[in-house]
Amino acid sequence: MKAIVYGLLASFFFAVTFVLNKWMSDAGGNWMWSASLRYIFMLPMLLIIVLLRNNFMHLIREMRRHPWRWAWWSFVGFGLFYAPLCFAAKYSPAWLVAGTWQFTIVAGSLLSPLFHEIIQTEVGIVKTRHKLPMRSIGMSLVILTGIIIMEWSQSTQVSLRDTVLGIVPIVIAAFAYPLGNRKMMELCEGKLDAYQRTLGMTISSLPLWIALSLYQLCTHGWPSAGQSLQTLIVSIFSGVIATVLFFTATDIARTRLHVLSAVEATQSGEVVFTLIGELLLISGTTISYAGMIGLILVVAGMVLHSLVSTREGHKPSKPSPPSVTMG
């Protein structure tokens, strides 16, 4: 239950990202600055937290064990997640980005066979590869239907080019975030807490953010004061608070796939929180009846996905041993 509560709180703070990214984009802010400044601002805040907890050297030792894997999965989990989301904000309203982002639940289910479950048996510790959670995927089709309806409602108002540029980056991000997050959990093996893991991934992804910043600085100059301030807010609310809450929730559930799926499903709250925030803060925001129906389907599908995942996790295991590979 604690993991679910943390997940819901994370969804509230994550919603700030979608609203402020759209606000910055409408004001002329460049997506490269929005993406890179978030992680550059996150670095000193997370560093102070980890240093005060006397956990920094432990983190460094773990990062030195697998530096290239840290660099790669941080690039996937942070870089290929956040840069595309910032890019998509230029072409879609915040509520649509948040709604389409929930495709990450579908992606998370499809990625299950890439991961193993550790099982203690009479002959020792073995690993069995997860199978596709078919019932969860069935509920994911409800989410996918809602996303299609939302995108269809938006496509009637914008060009095909803008529709594609608004959808494709989010789909890339939807696969990258759970993949990078789960691979990092495997790599860390429970040895690092959420603050350490978030700081480590921020440090490891810095080359990307520095490269984007230098490119943007050389081509268009410094970001505006307004964009810098709003990115700082995103860094605190979404980059630090929400990310740590979500990573804490996934760490709690990391050994139980059904609970992990339920935690990921709590991110449906982002859709509701983002829509409310955009309607309150960004003038001219509208949503059609079809778009609202799509949003409702997305939220309903995520709740159903969570319930099905939880029930699957409580099924009694069969007496016959699973097909395993020795770990």
Image (spheres, grey):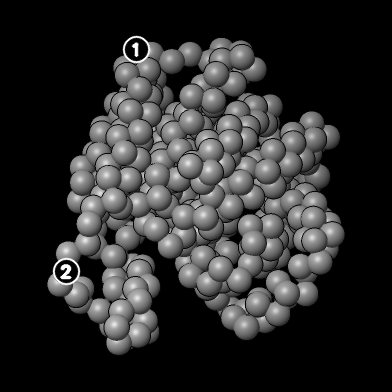
Q: Nearer the viewer, residue 177 or 151?
A: 177
* Residue that appears at 41% across and 41% down: 265
- Number of numbered discs on residues: 2
Which residue is tagged 1?
Answer: 289
> x, y (%) of residue 96?
45, 29
Indicate which label's residue lies in the foreground, 2 or 1: 2
Q: Secondary structure at mark 1?
A: helix
Judge whether 54 appears above or below 245 on screen. below
- Residue 146 left/right relative to 255: left
* Residue that appears at 34% across and 12% down: 289
Label 2, label 1: how far apart the Cα atoms are: 50 Å
Which residue is tagged 2?
Answer: 319
- Asked where in the image residue 225 lies, by quadrant, the reply is top right
Residue 232 visible, this angle: yes
* Residue that appears at 81% across and 66% down: 54
Judge whether 164 appears above or below 218 on screen. above
Q: Nearer the viewer, residue 292 or 9?
A: 9
- Asked where in the image residue 28 lies, by quadrant, the reply is top right
- How crowded pointer 2 is (Cα within 10 Å; few <14, some 14-19, many 20+) is rated as few
- Residue 120 left/right relative to 285: left
- Residue 51 left/right relative to 299: right
State which tag comes first along the sequence, 2 or 1: 1
- How crowded pointer 1 is (Cα within 10 Å; few <14, some 14-19, many 20+) is rated as few
- Asked where in the image residue 294 lies, by quadrant, the reply is top left
> x, y (%) of residue 242?
62, 43
Residue 168 visible, this angle: no
> x, y (%) of residue 100?
41, 36
Tag 1: residue type? Tyr
> x, y (%) of residue 310?
32, 45
Q: Nearer the viewer, residue 250 or 169?
A: 250
